[in-house]
Structure formats: C-alpha cells, structure tokens
Image (cartoon, rainbow, N blue to C red):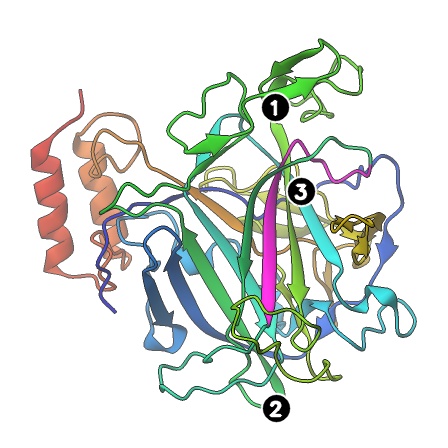
Amino acid sequence: MQRTHRHICTLIALSGSLSPLAHAGETPVTLEPSVGSVQQIAHIYYNVASGERVVTVLSDSQTSGSDSGYNYKQPLWAVESGPPCESAGYTSSFYFAVDDPTNTSMGGASPLATQITVLDMGDIAVDTVVDCVQVHWVVAHTDTDSDSDSVGDGVEELAGQWIIWDADNGRPNCHRLPLVDFTFYNLPGNIAGPDSQSAYTLDVDLVADFSSSDLTFEIGDSDGDCQSAAFCNSSVFDSATGTYLPVAQCDNNFDSLPDSDIDGDGLFDFSWTVRFYQPGIGNDFDSDSDTGSAAPSDSDSIGINFAVPEGSAIDNGDGTWTWNVDISAEAPGTGVEDGFVIYNPPISDGGGGEIITYNGFYWFGGFACVGDQYTPPAMFQFVLYGPRGLCSPADLNDDGHLNFFDVSQFILHISAGGDYNGDGATDYFDVSQFYQDYSAGGCP
C-alpha cells in the first residue's frame, strides 16, 4: 500500500536485553506463559496528529515499515520480535495473556485475571526525543472483517492503555512520573478462527507533516530544554534541593543519586505499562451508548507478545542461558531485566480517581531453549522511534557527511531488499530518490 506522508522515524530503543535479575534483591514469582496458535495479522500505521491510518497486511509480503522514509537498519514490524528458539521449532505460539477472565497462572481464578497493569522497564540515554511508539497485542476476542481488508473491524469497547513513565526502574518506591498516555479503543480482534489468536502491531506516529500538530515527547530531560519535542518533564519538584529541576536531576530519596539512575550507569531509567479493558464492563470510550458485549467469557483474552534483543542466545551448559546482545544493531536495548512488574487492578480512591498498588516482580522461570522445552524471556514487544535529525536523508551512516560510505551503505541494503522511499517496493524509484537526496547535499 502506498504511503502518502513523508515523516521519517528511526529506531532508538527498546526491546530489551537479558541481564541478571537485580530487582532490589527480590526473588521473582514464576508465571506460566500463555500458549496457543498465534497468527500475525497486520501492521497498522496510525498518525494521532493527522488521523491518517495505513494498514499493511503481513501476508502481502511487505518487508518495510508502514512509516515512510528510509529505515535501512531494520524493518519496523520485525523489530526485536519473534522467538529466540525458532531454529529449534518453537514459534510465536507463546505469549502472555495480560487480561484473561479465567487466568489460572496463579493457581486458580484470581483478581489479577483482569485489569492488571504490566510494567516493563529499561535504560535509555537522557534527552531522548520520541516521535513514534510501537505497541502490540494478541487477541482471542472474535471479530469480523466486513470490509474484506484482512483486518478485524474492531471489537466494541475492547481497549488498551499504554503509558510511558519517566524516572522508573520498576521498584515500588521509585519516583515515576507519567509522560504520555495512549488509550486505543475498539481494537481489532481475532479473525484467525476459533482455535487461534490474532496478533497486531501498531505504529503510533506523533507528528503530522502537513500541519503544525506535534505530539512528540522527550524522555529523561536533563537540562530543562525539551529539545525538538513538544513536551517533557522539564520542571519537577526536587525535595533534596527544594527547587524545581529537570526530571533527570531529581533526587527525592536523598541518596545522592538521581532518582532515574539508581544503578549509576549514566543512563535514564524509564518504563512502559499496558492495561487492557474488556467489553461489557461499563466503559463507553467512543461515546456511542454501547458498552460492548456481555461480560467477558473464558475465550476473551488479550495479551502481549514476547520479544528478544538483537543478538544470539548462548547456552551456558549448566541450565542457564545468557544473551549476547549485538551492540552494532541500532539500539539493542540496555538495562532490561529478565523480569517484569505487575500492579493490582485499580480501586477507587473515594474521590473519583483510582489507586493502583504494587503486586510483585515476575518472570517465567528464566530463559531456556533446551531439548523440548522453551521458556520465553520475560520481556515484551515495545519500540520507540525518534527523528533522524540528519543533515540529509542520504546520510545513511549517520556521520554528518555525504560520501562514498553512504553510497556503499545504500547499495548494501538495497541489494538486501531495502526500501529507501517507503513505498513498499525495492526498485528504480529508490535509486532515483537516493540520488536526488544525495545531490541536494545539506551536510558539511
């Protein structure tokens, strides 16, 4: 499908990398991953600033991301996703049912079965501008495809809420601050059949190129300047000094370390959360007086797909595995533990708001791919994108110069099926566009 916009997004983070469990010494609780036949249905591009929506059906053999412009290092929808043990025959049938009315992973029906919040955390450089976010869901809710576009029409009042947080390492006493909140309702559901679940990937673009709309944000502001982003946490009260400071400078627990860098590695601690809302529980996000179907049944689960960093899994020979992260890959993810946090379903605070309390730290038993046993890593598909910020789109190696190395890079990736102009094909038009961009100069 043709793209009609020119906004360029480049991967900046995150899927995650396996590292030793170091969650304040807490032993994680082991959960069972969800198992089922999962079919990857589509990649959806949605611009929240302009309202543009583009769907790329995976069966169409597309290999480029739905956002236009050249992202030569990785296809957008394949970023950090897929099972690490695929060569051993394990496929994407493993996922985590975040919201399942009959969840038994904790020994029977549990209040955690619905409306729990899952939090995953990582490290990123300070002053990181984000203009695209990629989210993902695996859904069992039966849907229809009345317009025959190979994507579900949308399940009435099935919703997902993704929030990105500043200054958060996943611990219950951290000083997290909400940065941006995305709630999408009437999510496309399952069209793969009663014995399967459908998986969707959604790129959320925050800039409308042909208007002044800009919803970009900066993670980890360190200098009170949001850079090119529309907003950031640039003025936060700091108890240690009694003044307002950029979020990356605050020390509200008086330990002489920034609240956002507890491990002291110079990177900024941030997190993302997801909570799903089932139909039939009273929500009317689209204000059409229809709150969805009856209360959720035992088949109405929705969850998230596992993810892995760029690199290779290494068998240590003693029942443990480590992850050899490919640091030459673009933003392989840093500081992410093989574990995640769960927060309890919300309760009323008595004043019209909600209280969400810490439940615990979880994993799936430690990554393993031995014989007939596959244990997935406890990290989930989630990606941030940022503006290239280059002197020219043709500066493919990001060194601020146009020269032989950019031409060589172009030839290598076009030879591998790359798509420079974002039209979903590798052809003469990619060569022509690169020549025009290169000839236009713009670099010192």
The part of the image, by quadrant, that contains residue 92 is bottom right
Q: Earlier in the sequence, mark 1 or mark 2?
A: 2
- The span from disc 1 to disc 2 (Cα, nearest Å) is 47 Å
Q: Is residue 81 left or right of residue 431?
A: right
- Which residue position is annotated with label 3? 121
- The span from disc 3 to disc 1 (Cα, nearest Å) is 17 Å
Extent of the magenta region: 158-172
Q: In percent of the image, x 80 and y 15: which residue is there?
A: 255
Residue nearest the observer in this picture, 69 or 335 = 69
Residue nearest the observer in this picture, 202 or 19 = 202
Q: Residues within 10 Å of mark 3 (few under 14, many from 20)?
A: many
Q: Is 166 one of the magenta-colored residues?
A: yes
Q: In percent of the image, x 26 and y 25: which residue is there?
A: 400
Q: Is residue 63 visible?
A: no
| Type of amino acid under label 1 | Val
- Which residue position is annotated with label 2? 194
The part of the image, by quadrant, that contains residue 300 is bottom right
State the image coordinates of residue 262 (x, y, percent, origin top left). 73, 25
Q: In percent of the image, x 87 and y 54: which residue is there?
A: 29
**Secondary structure under badge 1?**
helix
- Which residue position is annotated with label 1? 247
Q: Earlier in the sequence, mark 3 or mark 1?
A: 3
- Comparing marks 1 and 2, which lies closer to the viewer? 1
Q: In percent of the image, x 80 and y 20: which residue is there?
A: 253
Q: Is residue 313 visible?
A: yes
Q: Earlier in the sequence, mark 2 or mark 3?
A: 3
| Type of amino acid under label 2 | Pro
| Type of amino acid under label 3 | Met
